[in-house]
Every structure is written in structure tokens, then in C-alpha cells.
Amino acid sequence: MPCPIKLEGVPEKDQVKLGVPLGSKDFTCDYVKDDLLTRLKPVLERLEAFEDTQAAIYLLRVSFSIVRATHYMRTTPLDQWKEHAVSFDNNLKKSVENILAVKMTAPVRKQSSLTPKLGGLGFRRTVDHANFAYTASWHEALSTAQEQWDRPDGVPEEYKPQSVASFEFDQAVHTELVLEMETAGKLREAQRLQCLAQPHAGGFVTALPSRHDGHDTIIKPRTFRTAIYYRMGIPILDQETSCPLCMQTINIYGDHATCCSKSGDLIVRHNALRNLVERIARDGLLSPELEKKGILGSAPGRRPGDVTIAQWEEDRALALDIAVTSPLNDTNIRTSRSMPRTASTTSTTRTSRRARLTSSAQSCGRRSVQSTARERTICARSCALPPCARTTSTALTAAACGPASLAASSAK
Ligand SMILES: [Zn+2]
């Protein structure tokens, strides 16, 4: 539909209004190329030169990726500038690779284009989402103008917000990725993808790297890259190796290091998480107690919950237990199609003994303790690398657990 507003003295084919090319298709194509791509490359090169990998990825995602193309996605049909959209996406992909110092395979590229909520890095591709943005804007503008417009080809009759349409698209891609891995017999990869779609699993990707409130959201470049590799299923080691502490096999993804019982990191992370839970409870004026003594009597082998809240519900107390485990261990990989066995579900079994012990406190006539395994277990979805690599282990904890665990890990 021709634009009713025209610039005087400018040919029909060269019309531009509010930065939107309204002229011919060739004119529009060249206009977008000059505006979008010419200015993009110098900015990307500067970001790639950043020494701070975390900050570079953050800035690329929130300021220079699809956000930079949003103006044209919203105002100009994709078919008028598709070749430049493809070029734009390729430029971004190369920048991500240069910043992370890794070449992305097709599945990794596909995963990186997902929203962090579904395990991606938030580098959505313009060509995938431009039509959602354009059609949503067309409906929104029509509603605002309250006029009668002819609906362009390709614009559906029904309005759907761009955020909804984009998230549905990402969900379909995520499902497809999981199915591909399952079909190929790569159950670890399928489970990894499903675990990454759990709430807050991508928190470390979206957390603002800022020292304003301390150092908890700052990750060193090498550590950040390792965390991203682990998240994206990129091998961290060239080949399998033996754990120098317990001689068990560490696969190329480094899974064993997350749960090597010989590594002090396990206890350090457990205590960091325990302290974080206690701090949150204390901030909530719940008067928590760390490993409350005597609650289970004097019998040997009995241990209290990591954090106990004496006044929880009426005359009942609440005991919280913290378990550090990994959903990607061989023993935790699910073999049938169902919800992924996250760290919390797998650790439920491990803590059942303590649940029984806690229950016994009730039969002893002591103050009753509310303690189903699910309620009492808070898990660090751990992941890992060679246990000697302390910073790497921190990165993997962050990768799997998001900002809360990141804070806990950084606090140690
Ligand atoms: Zn080990």
C-alpha cells in the first residue's frame, strides 16, 4: 500500500520517512544495507577486541544483535531486505565465535539462537523472527490508527504479539533439537538441553556483569568461556582422561569433575549454597539455624538438616538439605521420554535416608519437622572439569545453576 505521506521534491522510489524506506524494493534494499551493515562491522570488531568476554557477549546480545535490526524488522517486510538480513546474521555468528574462541557447529548455532530461557544465548536470527515483528507491528499500528487498511500478503488475520510468536518459535526449535539428539542416541545431549530449559538455568547468561553490588555477577573470561562451552555441549577436553584424584573417567564434556567426591569443590559449593539459603531465610526474618544441633537426638549417624527454620508452620519446623549433584552423570541420564531428571529429582533419592532420620525425630516426641525430601532438598546442578581447575568448576556451577548459585560460588 503506498504511503499517504510523501516528502516534497523526492521521487516516489526514494521516499524515506522516520528512517523507514518507503520507496521501491531496490531502493529499500540498498538503504537497509547502508544503514544496517555498514555501521555494524566496526562495532562488532571493537566488541571482538574486548578482553572481557562476559561483557562482550552481554553487550552483543542486548545492544548489537537482533536489537540493531529491530527497526527494520518492525517496519519493512523481510522480503525487501532478506539478503542483508542473512548477511547480518552471519556477521553476528562470526562475532560470537571470535569472542568465545570457538567454531559453532550447526546444532550449537541453532541452540545459541534460542532465548536463554530455553538454553540458548539469546542470539536470535533476524531471518527467523523478522516476520513475527512485522506482522505484530502492522496489527498494532492498525489498532492505533483506527483506519481501514488492506492487509498485506503474508500478514495473518489474527494478531499475535511478537514476543509470544518468537517464544513459540524457540520452543519448537528446542523440541526439534531434543528430538534430534534422542534420535541420534545422544541421551546426555538431550537431557542437557532439557535441563537448560528449567527455570533460572540461564541466569548467568542474562545477569548484568556489574560490580555495583559486589563481584558476584563477574566471571573471568576463561571461566565464562568454559561455562558457555558446557552449556552449549561443546567439548572441553580433547579426549577422555582419568580423574587424578579418584581415577574415574572424565569425559570430553568434563561431567565427572562436577561430582568427584574426592574434590574439595563439592563441599565448598555445598557450603556456599547452604550459606546462601541461610542468608535468604535470615533476610526474610525466619531465624534460620545452620545444622541445628541435637534436633535428631544423640544416636550415631544422625545429622540435622543444613538449614533449620524452627517456626515454619504452626508448631512445625522446616529442615532444608542441600545436595550438590549433576543431572548429566551416567547414572542420572534418563532412558525414556519424560521430564528430564534434574538434580533435584535425582538427589531426592540420596536424601531419603536423612528424611527417614528426620521423621524419626517426630516419633521421638520432639518438635515435629516438616521434611519431605522434595521440600528439604535444594540442589546445585553441578557440572565440572578436572577438579584441579577451581575456576572452571565455578564456571560450570554458574553455567548450570544461574545467578543464585553463581553468587554462592563466587562467595566462597
Ligand atoms: Zn574424581
Image (cartoon, rainbow, N blue to C red):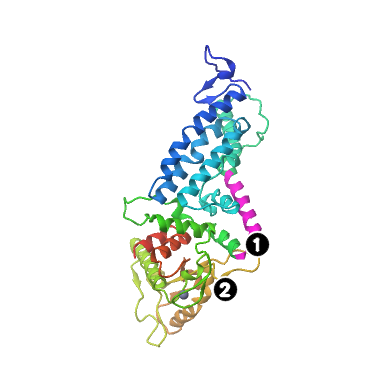
Check disc 1 and report its element: helix, strand or loop.
helix
Q: Residues within 10 Å of mark 2 (few under 14, many from 20)?
A: few
Residue corresponding to mark 1: 182
Write the residue at 54% across / 14% down: 10
On screen, residue 113 versus residue 357, left or right, reads: right
Residue 85 drawn in magenta: no
Above or below: residue 54 compared with residue 261 = above
Give the residues drawn in magenta, as a range: 166-187
Write the residue at 53% across / 75% down: 349
**Residue closer to the observer: 315 or 51:** 51
Residue 274 position within the rendered picture, expressed as x and y whole percent measured from the top left: 38, 68
Magenta stretch, main secondary structure, is: helix
Q: Residues within 10 Å of mark 1 (few under 14, many from 20)?
A: some
On screen, residue 339 versus residue 371, left or right, reads: right
Above or below: residue 205 compared with residue 17 = below
Looking at the image, the residue that sits furthest to the front is: 238
Check disc 2 and report its element: helix, strand or loop.
helix
Looking at the image, the residue that sits furthest to the top is: 9
